[in-house]
Amino acid sequence: MSDIKTEASASGPPVQRKETEPRIAAPSAVDSGVPSSGRRVAFRDVRRQLTDDELSHPGVQKLLLDILQEVDEDCDYLKSFVTLYHEADKKAAILSEKLLMNTTIEVFFGVGVGLGGTIIGLAPFLWGSKPEYGLITVLVGVCMIIGSTVGRMVKR
């Protein structure tokens, strides 16, 4: 059976070509019935199941128990990282909420000072027509500036 492969050429659309040589399948873990797993390439094709005769040897039992003990110790060690992760996650959430709150307060402060200054800037125009309107605009502008400044100081 020949396979059809698609190759991308540099100057045009993909071109299909037939393979002339048969593919040689490398022996895999599927052929031997043992799934290949693990990170080390040297142990990829090693049979991992032990027979009853192999399991009856005390050396094999000791090695398995030693490996089990090491894995249990690693598991206990890594469980401490789970609690550390959750603590760090809580701290990060709290700090991000504080940062969001500080940003909001800064925006309100800027708007309050800007509007207060604008209202105070309108006072000379209103003072000419009626002095009471000029005085009211100055008082409202000063109150807005003072209020936004006090709000910023309290939240810090």
Image (tube, rainbow, N blue to C red):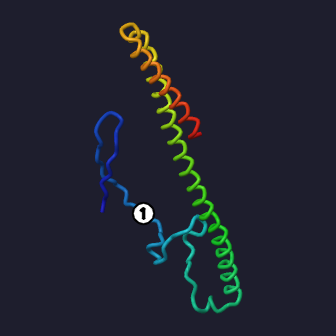
The answer to which of 148 and 60 lies nearer the viewer is 148
Name which residue type carries label 1.
Ile
Above-or-below relation of 72 to 106: below
**Residue beneath the point at 37% across and 11% down:** 130
> Can see residue 122?
no
The answer to which of 141 and 98 lies nearer the viewer is 141
> Can see residue 52?
yes
**Residue beneath the point at 30% across and 42% down:** 14
Q: Is residue 80 left or right of residue 134?
A: right
Above-or-below relation of 99 to 146: below
Q: Is residue 111 left or right of residue 40?
A: left
Q: x, y (%) of residue 147?
A: 51, 31
Tag 1 residue: 24
Per the image, label 1 sits on a secondary structure element best described as loop
Quadrant of the drawing holding the N terminus: bottom left
**Residue beneath the point at 44% across and 73% down:** 30
Q: x, y (%) of residue 155?
A: 56, 40
